Amino acid sequence: MAQGVTASRAAAPPRRRRRRRLDPVLLAFLVPAAVLYLWFVLWPTLQAFQYSLTDWDGLSASFGWVGPDNYEKLATGDSVFRKAFGNSLKFMLTVVIGQTVLSLALAVALLRSTRISIFLRALFFFPTVLSSVSVAFIWSFVYDPTFGLANRLLAVVGLGSWQQPWLGDQDMAIYYLAIVQIWFHAGQLMVVYIAGLQQIPQDLYDAAALDGAGRWQKFRFVTFPLLQPSTVIVVAYTTIQSFKAFDLIIASTGGGPNHATEILATLIYTTAFRNFEMGYAAAQSVIFMVLIAAITILQRKAVSLASGGSDR
Amino acid sequence: MNSPRSLRSTLPVRSPRATAVGRRSLLTAVGVGGAGAVLAACGGPGSGGSDEPAAAPEPGGEASGTVNFYHWRSEDKTVLEELASAFTEQSGVTIEQTIDPSEQYQSTAAQKARGGDIGDALTAFRGTQLDQFADLGIFTDLGDASYVGNYEENLISPGRHEGAQLGLPYQLIFNMPLLNTELAEQAGVSEVPGDWDAYLDLMDKLKGLGVTPIAWPGNDPANAFQIINSMAMNAGPDDQMFAKIETGENKATDDWWIDALAKFQELSSYFQDNFSGSGVDGVLSLFSQGEAAMLPTGSYQIGQVREAGGEFPLEFAPMMTNAAGEEPAFEGIFNSTFILGINSAAQNPEGAAAWIEHLSDPVNAAAYGDGTSQHVTVKGVEYQNEDLKALAPWASKRTLLAPRFQFLNLDIRSAIENSLIAVATGSTPEQAAEEAQKLVEEQL
Amino acid sequence: MSTSTETTAASPTAPRRARRRRPDWSELPRGALLAVYALLIAVPLVVVLLTAFKTSSQMYENPFALPATPSLANFAELWAGGRIGTSFLNSVIVTAVSVTVTLLVSSWAAFSISRIGGRLGTFLYLFFSLGLAVPAQVAMIPQYVIFDQLGLTNSLLGLILINIAVTCSVAIFILTGFFRTLPQELFEAAQIDGAGTWQLYWRIALPLSTPSLAAVAIFLFVMHWNDLLYPLLFITDPDLATLPKALLDFKGEYTTNYPVLFAGVIIASIPMIVAYVFLQRWFVAGITAGAVRG
C-alpha cells in the first residue's frame, strides 16, 4: 500500500494538467481528520484481528496466544454464535425486503406534491429522527402481551385470536423486531425513492401511454428500471443499517429471550463487555466483518448482473 | 492504600434493647433451619486465581464527601434515600444511588464498578456474581469490620468466599410464589397446597373462579425463573442439584429434571395468555388488581404489590412437586442476598464503610425492612410491617437456601432456566432437557 | 411469456381499472396503504405523548384515552431524580462540539482531497471511505482499550473524539463529492488575485457549499444526539451519561414504568422534534445524504 502511494505521487503530478507541488496548507488540512481516523478507527480495526488470536479477558495484564482456537470454537462448538449468525441474516433479509418494498410503495403513492402528500411524507419520515432507545421503549410498550397496543388493537377490531406474545415468541421475535426497524427507517428510504422518481422524465410516461401501457406496465417498464440507482442505494444502505441495529436491540430485548433476538453486533458486545472474553469477541467481530463484506460483494454482483453492467 | 484507621466511629451506639428482643426473632429461627444448606452451599470448590482481597477500611471519623451506592433495587430507592439523609446528618457523607435493573445488574455490574467510578459501596447477587466479584477483586474483605457482628452469622455465610467475608447479605428473601389468599378462599381452598395434586387442584379451582391462576413474567428471566427454586427443591436428588449440574455429576437429562419439567409444563397451562412475552410490570399489575391469583416470583415484590394497590392477604405457595402423602424434604425456599460490600477501587472507601455500618444498625435495618417489606439478616430487628409479621411462621419451617444461586456459570444457569420456557411453549420435557444439556456441555 | 399474462399474474385487478381512464375508486389501494401506514406511525406516537401525562394505572386501564387529569408528575419525578438535566446538558455539549469539529476537520480534509486531485486525491478519498465499511462492533473492543489507556473513558472529551473519528468518513465522503463539483475557474481567478489556500477554502469553497454543509451538519446532529454505543462503552459515571444512555438507565430505575419512561423519551426527543419542524427540508436532505453515501 505504501508503495502505491509513492508510485502515484511520483507519477501523477507531472502528467496532470497543472504542475503544482503539494501545497503544505492542503496537507495540513488533512492532518486532524487523518490522525483521529487512523488512531481511533483504522488502527483498532486492525488490532481486532490481533486480539482475535488471544484469550485475553480484557481485565488481566497478561494473555496467551491461542492461534486459531477462537475461530475453531466459533465454527464448531458455539450454538449461541450460530443462532446470532442466523438471526443476523433473518433480520437483514426481512428488513431489506420489507423496507425496500414499503418505501417504494410509499414513494409512488406520495409522488404528487399535494398538500396531504407533503404532510404524510413528513409524518412517515418522522421516526427517523428519534433515538433507537426511544423507539425501543415505544415498541416494548406496543408489544406488551397483556397491556400493549398491538394486542389491544387486535381485540378491538375483533381479531382477538391473532393476539401474540410478540417478543416472547422465540421463533418469531426477531421478525417482530425487524418490523420495528422498518417502522423506524422506511420513511427515510421513501425520501430517497421520491428523489429518484422525480428525476424520471415525464415524456417517458407519455410515450408509454401512447403505446397503450397501463399503470402497472408503466411501473414495470419505465419506473422500475429507471429507479435502479435508487434501489441500489436503498438496498445497500438498508443492509448495513440492519447489521447495525445494535442500539435498537440492546434497548428493547437485550438479545433475549434465550438469544432469540441476538444478532452478531449484540453478541460481540455481550461477549466482550459482559462475559469479559475480549479475544473471543474479537474473533466474532472478524467473522462479522467478513460476513458484511461478503454480502456487500454479492449485492454488487447482483446489481451489475441485473442491470447488464450498464449502470456503473 | 488505606488511611490509618480511626477506631472511634462517629455513629452513636445503639441501645442493646432491640438486640435482646431480637434473639427470638424470625431471622434466628430461619438461620438455624437453613444453616446446613447454607454451609453446604458454600463448601463447594472455589474458582481460585484471585489474590487475597484487600481489607476493608473501618468507618472512620474523617469520612466525608459523596458515596455512590450501586444496586439493583429501584423499589427501595425512597427508603434508602430516607436512611441516607439521616446518615448525612450524622456523618456529613452524602449518598448517591446508582440503580440498574436486576437482569442488567447481574450482567454489567462488574464492568461498571471495576474502575470505581460508581459503586463505592455496592451489592452482589449470591452465586455467579459474588464469585465474579471475588475473581476480579472487586470486593474488599470485611472480615475485621466491627459491624459484621451485627448480622446473623448463618445468614451472611453466602457472603464469604475462600475464607474472606467479602460482603454482607442484607436481605432475607423468600423466593416463592405469592398467593392471594382472598381469591384462594373464594375458590374454596383455605390451605396452601402441600403436594402436587393439591397444587393442581388449587389451580383448577382458581380457574373456575374466572381469574388467571398464575401471572408469570415469561419475558423477564431474572424474575420468571425464581420459580425454579421451589420447583427443584423436592425434585432434585439432594440439595446440591444445580451445583452438581455444573460439575457434570447431574445432567439436565436426568429423570428428576425431566419429571420437574413435565410438572412445570402442566403448571404453565394455568398462566395468563401470551405469558412468554410478559414483563414483570404487567404481571405485577394483574396480580395487584386481583385479576391473577399468584405471582410466582418472591417476597421481594410484596412492597410493589402493596404500592400498586393490592390490599389482599398474602401467603407463600411454593411449587410442591411431591406426591400426595409423601413427606417433602423442604417446605420452602429462602435466600440471603443483596450482598453489601465495599469496592476495592472505591473513591471514598471510608465513606462507603460508614454507610454499610449505618445500614447494619438494627434500628436502621428495621426501617429498611419495614419500608421495603423485606426481611433483613441483621440481628435484633423488630418489624412493624404487617406483611413481615404475617409471614413470620416461615421462619420455623424447613427451608432450603435458594438452589438457583448454586450456579456459578451464568450460561449454564440460562441453559437450564430456558428449558422452562421451552416446555411452557410446546417442547416436550425430553427435548427441552436435551437442548439444555447440550448447551451445558458446551460450557463444561 | 407475454406481457399481458405477466401483468395479470402480478396484479389481477389493476389493468382492468387502468383501462377505464381512472375512475375514482382506483385510488383505493393507494388511499388504504397511506391511511393504514399513517395510523401505524401516528398511533404509537400519540399514545406515548398521552401516556407521559398519565399515571401507570390510567395507562393500564386504557392507553388510548385522553388523560383524565393531565399531570406533569412524571416529568417532575424524572426531574427530581436529578439525572435528566445533567444528561441533557451532556448531550448538548457532546453533540454541539462533535458536530462542529467534525464539520471543520472533514471540510478541511474534503477540500484538500478535492484540490489535490489526481491519483493521490483518489487514494485519499478511498482511504477515508474505508471507514464506511468498518462496522462499529469490529473496532469497538480495541477502541475501548485505547480509550481506557488514554484515560478517555468516563470523559465527555472521549465521546467527542470518538464521534469525530467515526463520523468523519461519511462527512468527508459527502463533502468531497460536493467540492469536486465546484467550478475550478473560481479558484483559478482567486489565485490570480493572490488568494492563498486558506482564503480559497474560507472565502470560496465554504460559502458555496452551505447547503451541503447544512445537510451534513443535520446528519451528524441526528447521529451524535442519538448515539448509544459509545456512551454505553465508555461511560459508567451517571453524571457523564448522555440522553440515550440515561434513558436506558431509567429503564432500570423505573423498571418498566412506562409513563415516566415516556416522559423521558419526550424530553430526549424535544430538540430533534423542534429542529425537525423548523428545518424539515434540511433534515430530509441531510439524512438522505447519509443514506446515499452507499
Image (cartoon, helix red, strand yellow):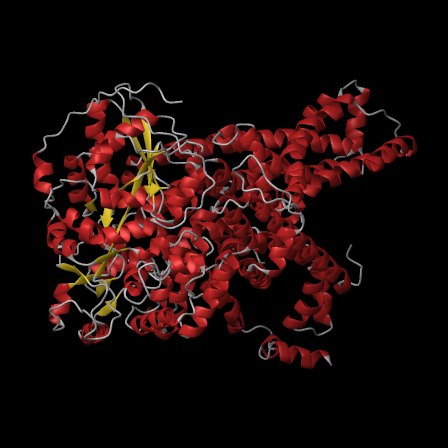
Q: Is residue A220 above or below residue B315?
A: below
When asked about the image quadrant of residue C1, the answer is bottom right
Residue C246 visible at all: yes
Q: Is residue A131 above or below residue C152?
A: below
When asked about the image quadrant of residue B21, the answer is top left
- Rendering coords of residue C60 (x, y %): 27, 58
- Rendering coords of residue A248 (x, y %): 48, 51
The residue nearer to you, when weighing B259 against A158, is B259
Total numbered badges shown on the rendered structure: 0
When asked about the image quadrant of residue B147, the answer is top left
Which residue is located at x 54 percent, y 43 percent?
C283
**Image quadrant occupied by the N terminus of chain A:** top right
Q: Is residue B86 above or below residue A69?
A: above
Residue C50 visible at all: no
Which residue is located at x 74 percent, y 30 percent?
C112
Which residue is located at x 63 percent, y 80 percent?
C9
The residue nearer to you, when weighing B105 against B277, is B105
Direction from residue C256 to residue B311 in the image, left or right: left
- Rendering coords of residue B222 (x, y %): 35, 54
Which residue is located at x 24 percent, y 69 percent?
B212
Direction from residue C200 to residue B425 in the image, left or right: left
- Rendering coords of residue A74 (x, y %): 60, 56
**Image quadrant occupied by the C terminus of chain A:** bottom right
The outermost residue toward the right is A15
Direction from residue A48 to residue C127 in the image, left or right: right
